[in-house]
Image (tube, rainbow, N blue to C red):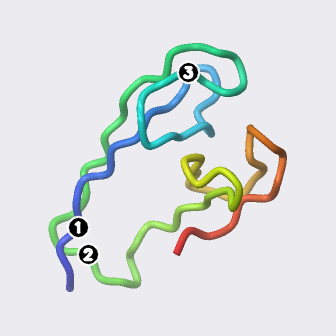
Amino acid sequence: MEMQKDTVYYTCTMHPEVRLDKPGKCPRCGMELVKKTIKSETNLNNSEAVVTYTCTMHPEVTADKPGKCPKCGMELVVKK
């Protein structure tokens, strides 16, 4: 088992698939991003780890499911 940290990201209230690692404006609509924190379990097994998807050209864009990058339209890949 390993200890996990809380995950903090910034997202758009109109486009929840947009997730950036710092504050700013939504690349799709220009609205101010809001801070979100995901509380992690204290003891997670590797098999229970959350899968995150990201854009190879825009690593600040992350999502919890497959899809397309809102900035360039490329397919999101599993973040390593």
| Residue 18 picture location, percent across and down | 60, 37
Task: Kindly identify the amino acid type of the residue bearing the numbered disc 3.
Answer: Lys
Pointers 2 and 1 in contact (C-beta within 8 Å): yes
Residue 7 left/right relative to 4: right
Considering every residue shown, the one lying at the far top of the view is 31
| Residue 52 picture location, percent across and down | 53, 62
User: In the rendering, which numbered label is found on residue 25?
Assistant: 3
Please name the residue that numbered disc 1 is placed on: 4
- Identify the mark nearer the N-term, 2 or 3: 3
User: In the rendering, which numbered label is found on residue 44?
Assistant: 2
User: In terms of image quadrants, where is residue 71?
Assistant: top right
Task: Kindly identify the amino acid type of the residue bearing the numbered disc 1.
Answer: Gln
Disc 3 crowd, CA 10 A, few/some/many (<14, 14-19, 20+): some
| Residue 11 picture location, percent across and down | 50, 31
SS for callout 3: loop
SS for callout 2: strand
**Front one among 34 and 44:** 34
Residue at image position (53%, 40%) is: 19
User: In terms of image quadrants, where is residue 26?
Assistant: top right
